[in-house]
Amino acid sequence: MATVNPTISVTIEVNGQSHSRTMEPRRLLAHFLREELALTGTHIGCDTTQCGACTVLLDGQAVKSCTVLAVQAEGHHVTTVEGIGRMGALHPVQTGFWEEHGLQCGFCTPGVMMASIGLLSQNAAPTDADIRAGLEGVICRCTGYQNIVRAVQHAARLGDQTHDGSVQAAAALHGEGC
Ligand code: FES
Ligand code: FES
């Protein structure tokens, strides 16, 4: 007799929109975002919780979405890289990566940017050492990290700009949705 896996109904707010799905309780948040919502900016670069490519904000805190069950995000606010800015109104971290060329292949970049936003929400004026320590959970194979540090410093200097992208992100960082 075939085994029927149990399912559960889960509702999560992602980038300001509520999404309800029925799924197995073991479904990872990273897979929920990519496969159910087509938010493929959240990358999966390992199966050992090491690379950080899957980093998103959960109520403003940077988390590795491959280590969070979707059901654990029930009733919480998730922000992915798709939710932090848009063309013409980039988030300061996106501007920093653009201006300081904080990427090469770009595979790690969504996770690094989300981790950077989490870092800046805790420490608005980090030293280079603070940035390197704060981003130790995300791995970049290309850049050597120097331009990533410059990009985060650039974003910190931009501070609390009030264009749409930063307002949206600031709301997400404070758990208010986008
Ligand atoms: S995919 Fe590598 S830490 Fe999540
Ligand atoms: S830019 Fe290629 S892995 Fe970071």
Image: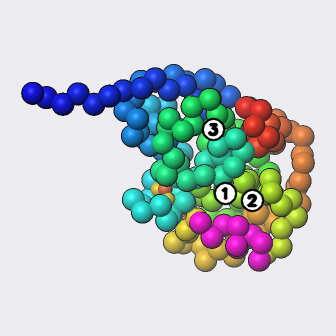
Q: Name the residue under label 1.
A: 115
Q: Distance between the residues labelled 2 and 1?
A: 6 Å
In this rendered view, identify the residue nearer to me: 22 or 98: 22
Upstream in the sequence, badge 3 or badge 2? Answer: 3
* Residue at position x 37%, y 32% in the image: 24
In this rendered view, identify the residue nearer to me: 134 or 156: 134
Upstream in the sequence, badge 1 or badge 3? Answer: 3
In this rendered view, identify the residue nearer to me: 54 or 163: 54
104 horizontally vs 89: left or right: left
Task: Look at label 1 and name its amino acid.
Answer: Ala
Q: Name the residue under label 3.
A: 78
What quarter of the picture does the C terminus occupy?
Answer: top right
Residue 45: x and y in percent read 44, 59
- Secondary structure predominantly adopted by residues drawn in magenta: helix
Q: Give the range drawn in magenta.
A: 129-137
* Residue at position x 70%, y 73% in the image: 132
> For mark 3, does the 10 Å Cα neighbourhood hold few (<14), some (14 to 19), or many (20 or more) residues?
many
Q: Distance between the residues labelled 3 and 2?
A: 16 Å
Residue 15: x and y in percent read 65, 33
Q: Quadrant of residue 97?
A: bottom right
Q: In this view, does 102 lie above or below 80?
A: below
Question: CB of mark 1 within 8 Å of CB of mark 3?
Answer: no
Q: How far apart are marks 1 and 3 (CA)?
A: 13 Å
Residue 165 numbered mark, or none: none
* Residue at position x 73%, y 32% in the image: 177
Residue 164: x and y in percent read 82, 35
* Residue at position x 54%, y 39% in the image: 72
> For mark 2, does the 10 Å Cα neighbourhood hold few (<14), some (14 to 19), or many (20 or more) residues?
many
Label 2 element class: helix
Task: Look at label 2 and name its amino acid.
Answer: Leu
